[in-house]
Amino acid sequence: MTLGSIEYVITGDSFAKLFRMLTREGLVYSDMKQLSGEIRICVSLEYCLRFERCCKAAGYQPKRTGVRGILRFYKKLTKHPGIIFGTILSALLIGYYSNVILRIDIDTTDTALRDRITDVLKEDGFTAGAYIPELDLVLEERSLKQKIDEAAWIGISRTGAGISVDVIEAVEAEKGFNVGMPCHLVACEDGVIEEVELLDGQLMKCIGSGVTKGDIVVSGKIVSENSEWSADGEHVTRKTRYVRSIGKVRGSFTRTVEFEQPFDTEVKSLTGTEKKLHFINIFSAQIPMFAKVPDGWYETEYEKQDFPEIGGFRLPFGHTEICLREFDMRSQLLNEEEAFALAEKSAYRYEQNFLKNYELKNKNCRKEVNKDSVRLTVTYELYGEICKESDFFIPAYILPTDENSQEKKCAR
Amino acid sequence: MGKTPDISFFGKTRELLCLSSYIKIVDNSSALVENCRQISECTEVCVRLLTGSFEIEFWGSGLSLSSYAEGCVEVRGLIEQVRLVSRGVRRRDNDSGKH
């Protein structure tokens, strides 16, 4: 009696036919009582039509007197259409949001890799609001693996109203194989050696000497000679040893870099329009409270999360507000000052990114104005490491014999 | 009156095929009868049911009948007396006008 039941009253003189019919048809009923000249019976809603039909066939006239169970609730519902509308709307929303991507979780700490994966997903249509049954997760996994070399393995799984991307980053194998191999320390800048800290290898240049790019400063090939005198003359034994040059060679050098800034350039300018996006957070689902993602270019000004707490325990539902500022890329014609200011900004960024490991001793800037652009030539006087390791080739026939003896005879 | 055999062939077969009537009584408030063939009477004081080999009478007050499965009825109310009459004996009594 899941859908409720209906109460009937049947009048008559003899109810033997009714009893036979109930047993024969296997109807589900309850609370059947025979009072003076009538029978009261309660029949389940699923069987009521069959019961009425059978009663009429047997010559009885059943009368409905009331309803029981959930049917009473249905009758009340008809007086409150708002509840029906709300229930249907909720069911539709649940059906819709359970099949739509509301959230994309990417399981990696590498922000660059995360951005790359997000871009590829966006290209393939895996964005917030996409209909999940239309998306092929296996194909997308393959696509991600093909397009992103930094990931060794990528798996996509559906998690409620969203997708979760598991990533195993490709870790480059350590170059341990080369560690024991012999190498030189070769100058990578044109400069003057000022300081040497040598642990292994043979120093080929002294402190104070100048080097150019490619010069061997510390050699991994160490040749030692031993001279012995006998009655036959001088015997010179020459030994060659190959080592890995370990050490630091510091010196002063200059580096010249040119920064060019065209007058006609694109600049990012805020339009002054601000938009706020609201989300409702329920557990891990982030439900957008807007129908359409605004068009245009936006940057995030702030993101505010409001989750209620009870006794220090954060409840799993709350509200997120993201404030966006609209910006536009506009073509702008710069004057000389503005162009040089931008070029100096580029030089500053270069210093921050590439010259951090060196001590900046001096800096000379030369400004040139061309027809379409300005050029800033900066000459840096730097102090720091000027050598780098360089592996060298050892012929195979030398390797088995570490020592090569050479005898030299001298006339007495 | 002939001697009733200890082992009846039909009785054993009915038992093996689960055709016997099973009656489960809970205190004096309800009784469940399985393998009920027919309802003979259903008043507030008397419910009479026919099974394969017995006529079962429930006497009491405020009795009502429910059925949730085929061949299975439940008697509810204040049961005071349960009477089992063999259908064979009932037929003989009816034939000799002793009812």
Image (spheres, grey):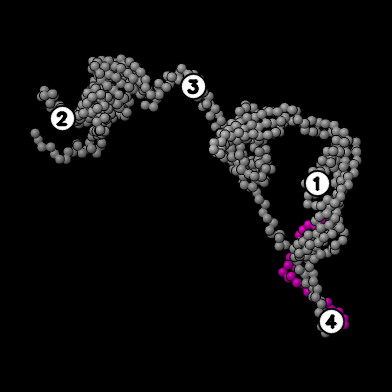
Instruction: Identify the secondary structure beneath mark 4.
Output: strand
Residue bearing mark 4: A233
Given the current orientation, which residue lies at the most extreme bottom position? A231
Q: Earlier in the sequence, mark 3 or mark 4?
A: 3
**Where's residue A303, x and y in %?**
66, 34
Q: Verify CB contact (< 8 Å) between mark 3 and mark 2.
A: no
Determine whether B13 is above or below A183 in the image: above
Given the current orientation, which residue lies at the most extreme front position? A311
Q: Is residue A399 magenta?
A: yes
Give the prevailing secondary structure in the magenta stretch: loop
The residue at the point 84 percent across, 59 percent down is A194
Label 2 marks a residue whose chain is B
The front one of B42 and A25 is B42
Quote the CA–CA distance across marks 3 and 4: 117 Å
Label 4 marks a residue whose chain is A
Residue bearing mark 3: A84
Q: Verify CB contact (< 8 Å) between mark 3 and mark 4.
A: no
Label 1 marks a residue whose chain is A
Residue bearing mark 2: B88
